[in-house]
Image (cartoon, rainbow, N blue to C red):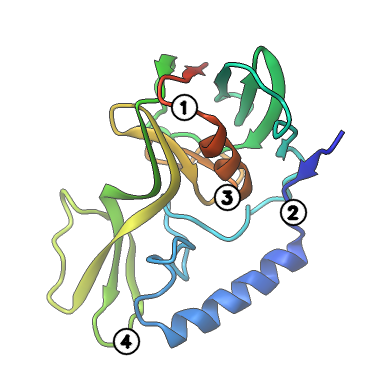
Amino acid sequence: MNRLLFPCSALFALLLSSCFQQNNQANPRGNYLAGLGPLKYSSHGSGPAPAIPDDLSYWDGDNITGAPMIRINRAQQKASFYKGGKLVGVSRISTGKEGHNTPPGTYKVTEKDIDHHSSVYGCFKDKQTGAMVNDNVDIRVDKTPTSCIYYPAPMKNFLRFADGIGMHTGYLPGYAASHGCIRMPDFIAQKFFENANLGTPVIVE
């Protein structure tokens, strides 16, 4: 079996964090536009690695055919991908936090956007320095300061299945922390995106 685990040792995460800090200093627009998340992680943006070791996520589905189906287990913070009824991949996830709960139910994938950005959430960065001013912005209620620029949160490998809710690459703190979307490690989010079709069933329980 060719089981590929998502790599994320503490040292790997530390090295990535160091690289991102250097990149953010060289590029005032920061990592937000690159889909890597701001220097200080937002509650909805992407991040380079989970906050906890990921010994759960894997993908075995490249050489397997069959109708795709995705099952989201909120209690276990786990997403499973099936082909023809066979389990071919599992992802550690972060679902909606209290007040922004991911709604249970049976859905279908209605949109695929590999380079999606949030229409609601993002961050404010200083125009001159590129420094993070507010990494948890809701543009519907937060007015952009004159000294800042607003950047929408990146949601790479976005699979929409409900109104305003989808699966995408995102930062995993180890618990439900999103505004309703389902965050995944980037590698597994790519696999889910590549193998799901419009109309793929999504069961949230």
Among numbered discs 3 and 4, the one appearing first in the sequence = 4
Q: Are marks 1 and 3 in contact (CB under 8 Å)?
A: no
Q: Is residue 181 visible?
A: no
What x and y, as percent, mark residue 92? 64, 38
Circle 2 — which element?
loop
Label 3 and label 4: CA atoms lie apart by: 29 Å
Q: Decide which of 54, 99 is in the foreground and name it.
A: 54
Left or right of 45 on screen, residue 14: right
What x and y, as percent, mark residue 75? 59, 24
Q: Is residue 82 above or below residue 26?
A: above
Circle 3 — which element?
helix
Circle 4 — which element?
loop
Give the residue pinned by disc 1: 197
User: Which amino acid lies under the numbered mark 3 shown in the image of this protein?
Assistant: Asp
Q: Which mark is residue 129?
A: 4
Q: Decide which of 204, 107 is in the foreground and name it.
A: 107
User: Which amino acid lies under the numbered mark 1 shown in the image of this protein?
Assistant: Asn
Q: Are marks 3 and 2 in contact (CB under 8 Å)?
A: no
Give the residue pinned by disc 2: 7
Q: Which mark is residue 17?
A: none
User: Which amino acid lies under the numbered mark 2 shown in the image of this protein?
Assistant: Pro
Q: Which tag is nearer the camera, tag 3 or tag 4?
A: 3
Give the residue pinned by disc 3: 186
